[in-house]
Amino acid sequence: MTDRRRFLAFLAGSPLLAAAGLNERVLRDLGAGSHRRAAAALQAAQQAVQDGSLIARASAALNVFDFEPVAKKKIPIAHWAYLATGTDDDATIGANREGFDRWALRPRRLVNVDEPDAGVTLYGTRYPTPIVINPVGSQKAFHPLGEIAVARAARARDHLQVLSTVATTSIEDAIKARGATVWFQLYHDVENWARTLQMVQRAERAGSAALVFTVDLLAGSNREAMIRGARRDPRHCVDCHLGGAPLPGVSAVNDRDIRRKPNLVGYPDVPRIPETGTPTWEFVDRLKASTGMKVLIKGIVTREDAELAVQHGADGLFVSNHGGRAENSLRATVTSLPEVVQGTRGRIPVICDGGFRRGTDIFKAMALGAASIGIGRPYIWGLGAFGQEGVETVLALLRKEFELVMRQAGTKNIAAITRDHIVARN
Ligand SMILES: Cc1cc2nc3c(=O)[nH]c(=O)nc-3n(C[C@H](O)[C@H](O)[C@H](O)COP(=O)(O)O)c2cc1C
């Protein structure tokens, strides 16, 4: 151990590694006890020093991780940091991944699954896989076509897409590019209900079938990796962002720049920022009463809140910790999933997101009662690396892996995947 620590300290001082983009966290993880973190750090180290190993085209990817270093190279460092950041020391991002390791597969044999059917039906619409494209803000920070490229990929592969309030594409344009409904994710504006109502009505008019109300950022979040990355960017944020936003702490909150956020403009009394005031369950009641769209709540992680959500008429839930970007809970969403499902008692669909990167991850969540699963960063890696084709390939790879696991486990459709197909590891 002493030798290893000395070696790592030596590495940490190497200008060569700094030039290759290796940071202290990677080196620390290399020396960590956890097998998963060490393996991930090793992979990052290998990718950073062997530039030649980066895939040159989407079709060369073996898995979704292959897109990450390519996207990292192409995306400006401040924008990359916005994508990659968690909160505090980013530990909940790792916890989300480690949550899947707590479960092992319990496959059944001699079942004919030549043609697995991974299809799910959400509120009457059938999708060929349970993989939902989760809301991620500001996608034109990663590729010039941003959410439009993602919508076209969603259309080509027939996936459900959820558009963020702070998207760089309007809900109208996203639905046009998708050629079908896109759900609208809502950040609240408690201080001015009239404006919230206008946003909700606009989404409904545009053709959104569902409103996804995100509730896990009510107290803000401490995104240190984002600030560090922005500091390393030689460009000046103020050249593009009013007041130097979106850096928290750099400018007053009210200076947050919404010029490229079309879902926040066009109202007589424009909200300068989407998140104002602290909503309570009463806000959910108001949302429900104000729209014909389905209303889902995103960010629920406890049985108690799942029960309350059902009582307040929610039509569905996202078990989510914002991809480790909300509170640094250290609790994997796949660990929270069973109690949330229990709280709903099967009355409304539960979608789980956070750390899904493999077909086996999807299988485990479906076995624990998820109706679908959501992905965030992986499709943005695809977008940043190769635009629409990258997103499509990420979706195709995840689907291929998931269908393979379904075959391996002897489960011919989603209903056949049960709790008996997985078992807790010690
Ligand atoms: C860069 C970034 C921006 C995000 N923006 C939003 C958002 O605007 N609204 C929202 O509800 N969730 C947002 N999320 C959270 C995602 O919807 C999702 O919960 C999370 O990314 C899932 O974890 P994963 O990235 O490990 O797949 C964002 C996530 C990232 C990485």
Image (cartoon, grey):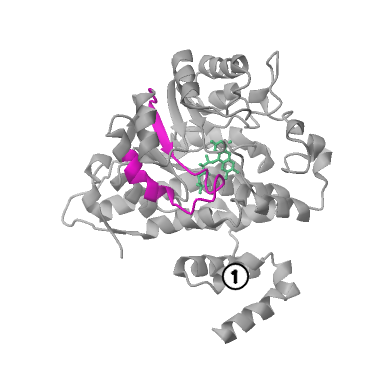
Could you say where residue 256 lies in the image, as x and y percent from the top left? 73, 33
Q: Is residue 331 covered in magenta?
A: yes
Q: Is residue 224 above or below residue 138?
A: below
- Dividing the picture into quadrants, the one containing residue 267 is top right
Residue at image coords 60%, 47%: 386
Q: Residue at position x 58%, y 65% from top?
A: 44
Residue at 63% x, 52% y is 71
- Residue occupied by mark 1: 28
Q: Residue furthest bottom?
A: 3
Q: Residue furthest left?
A: 110
The residue at the point 56 percent across, 68 percent down is 29
Say if residue 346 shows up in the picture. Answer: yes
Residue 2, picture quadrant:
bottom right
Viewport quadrant of the N terminus: bottom right
Q: Is residue 134 shown in magenta?
A: no
Q: Count residues near mark 1 (Cα–Cα under 10 Å), then give few for <14, some for 14-19, many for 20+.
A: some
Specify the amino acid type for callout 1. Arg
Q: Nearer the viewer, residue 3 or 410?
A: 3
- Whether residue 51 is visible to the viewer of this picture, yes or no, is no
Q: Position of residue 74 (x, y in %)?
A: 68, 52
Q: Quadrant of ligand 1?
A: top right
Label 1 sits on a secondary structure element that is helix
Which is nearer the eye, 205 or 96?
96
Query: Looking at the image, is 407 positioned above or below residue 135?
Result: below
Q: Nearer the viewer, residue 202 or 133?
A: 202
Q: Measured from the top left, where is residue 399 in percent x and y?
A: 39, 46
- Specify start and end residues of the magenta stretch as a single range: 313-341
How many numbered discs, if any? Answer: 1
* Quarter of the image with the C terminus in it: bottom left
Q: Residue 289, position in %: x, y?
A: 45, 14
Going by the image, does 119 lie left or right of 267? left
